[in-house]
């Protein structure tokens, strides 16, 4: 793996092999994050970006958040960075009301000025209005449009934005006949469970979803919301998770299907989080899995 600092003017500096690295990806976090520490020799360049690549695969490309240099018996450079989605998360959008909005126009207004490589998705104009509220981030402005009109969340990878269905990847296996597991742990998030969700129906509140089985077991939690079906589905998704530690850095993706041999049965799961780590003990990956919820 090669690591580089670079700037918008074309300056590029290769870093020495890191002492440790942590790369995080989560389904509910638009920006990936990377933290690392490197031996330091000479002056720290005035860089704005960090890139990690191996052969022709880009593992990370994003903006630097912090750079800390320390000078002692060993000189060290510690950095933290987030993928380019952070540019939109950190920037506030100008309030606006768009008539017959389109993805292409929203992209030009809210993302193109930050140096993104483009956006994939349906760019046909839609009938109606779309409002960007005061206090919204640039990400919220563009993501809100994608969810409302395209019915897809906004995603970013290596400077390219996407508002299209996630392409299916080949499922992989963990445990027997697959990637060996060093450790498996299961968590039940009882506090995330919802027994019912309600929403406004006309002029009054109406129960839209109900889990009778949860109520019978004593889990009584109600939520009033604008999108009851999605809220109910998210609660079910977050109610249970399995953490799997394995050796190496397998090239997997968020939402990819994984079959886990656990507790004497084969479970169909979906990746919700990835933690790549490099330390003096080598490379490991911690995968956060959740049951597939349709």
Image (spheres, grey):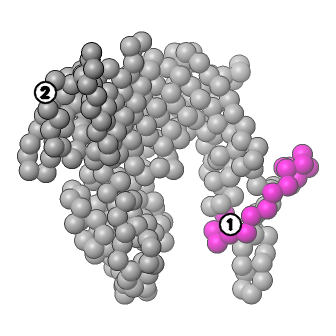
Q: Quadrant of residue 244?
A: top right
- Compared with 257, 206 (above or below) is below
Residue 184 % position (x, y)? 62, 22
Q: What residue is at 43 percent from the left and 52 percent from the top?
A: 30
- Numbered circle sitting on residue 85: none
The residue at the point 49 percent across, 47 percent down is 27
Query: Magenta segment: does it hold 73?
Result: no
Neighbours of disc 2 within 10 Å: few (<14), some (14-19), many (20+):
few
- List x then y, in percent, for residue 283: 40, 19
Q: Earlier in the sequence, mark 2 or mark 1?
A: 2
**Circle nearer the viewer, 2 or 1:** 2
Taking the view exactly as shown, the residue that stands out farthest to the top is 281
**SS of the residue under disc 1:** helix
Residue 42 badge: 2
Dot 2 falls on a residue whose secondary structure is loop
Furthest residue in direction front, as rendered: 72
Q: What mark, if any, has residue 228 been given in the picture?
A: 1
* Image spot of residue 216 (x, y percent): 91, 49
Residue 131 point in image, percent of width and height: 44, 81
* Crowdedness near tag 1: few (<14), some (14–19) or many (≥20) residues, C-alpha within 10 Å: some
Left or right, 212 with respect to 99, comes to right
146 up-or-down from 101: above or below: above
Q: Quadrant of residue 6?
A: top left
Q: Quadrant of residue 227?
A: bottom right
Q: Start and end of the magenta stretch?
A: 213-229
Between 280 and 98, which is closer to the camera in this rendering? 280
User: Does the rendering let one see residue 178?
Assistant: no
Residue drawn at point x = 68 percent, y = 52 percent: 235
> Within the magenta stretch, is there residue 217?
yes
Whether residue 232 is visible = yes
On screen, residue 277 above or below 142 = above
């Amino acid at each position: 793996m090669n690591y580089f600092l670079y700037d918008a003017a074309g300056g590029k500096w290769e870093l020495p092999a890191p002492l440790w690295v942590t790369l995080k990806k989560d389904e509910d976090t638009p920006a990936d994050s990377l933290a690392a520490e490197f031996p330091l020799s000479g002056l720290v360049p005035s860089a704005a970006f960090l890139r990690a690549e191996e052969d022709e695969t880009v593992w990370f490309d994003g903006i630097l958040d912090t750079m800390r240099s320390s000078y002692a018996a060993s000189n060290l450079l510690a950095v933290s960075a987030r993928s380019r989605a952070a540019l939109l998360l950190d920037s506030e959008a100008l309030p606006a009301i768009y008539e017959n909005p389109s993805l292409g126009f929203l992209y030009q207004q809210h993302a193109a000025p930050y140096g993104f490589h483009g956006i994939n998705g349906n760019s046909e104009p839609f009938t109606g209005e779309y409002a960007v509220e005061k206090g919204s981030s640039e990400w919220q402005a563009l993501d809100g449009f994608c969810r409302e009109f395209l019915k897809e969340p906004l995603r970013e990878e290596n400077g390219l934005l996407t508002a299209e269905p996630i392409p299916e990847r080949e499922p992989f296996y963990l445990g027997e006949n697959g990637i060996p597991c060093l450790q498996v742990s299961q968590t039940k998030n009882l506090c995330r469970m919802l027994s019912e969700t309600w929403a406004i129906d006309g002029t009054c509140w109406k129960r839209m979803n109900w889990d009778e089985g949860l109520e019978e077991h004593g889990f009584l939690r109600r939520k009033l919301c604008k999108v009851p079906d999605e809220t109910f589905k998210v609660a079910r998704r977050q109610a249970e998770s399995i953490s799997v530690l394995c050796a190496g850095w397998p090239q997997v993706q968020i939402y990819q299907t994984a079959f886990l041999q656990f507790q004497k049965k084969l479970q169909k799961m979906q990746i919700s989080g990835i933690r790549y780590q490099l330390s003096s003990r080598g490379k490991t990956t911690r995968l956060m899995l959740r049951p597939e919820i349709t």
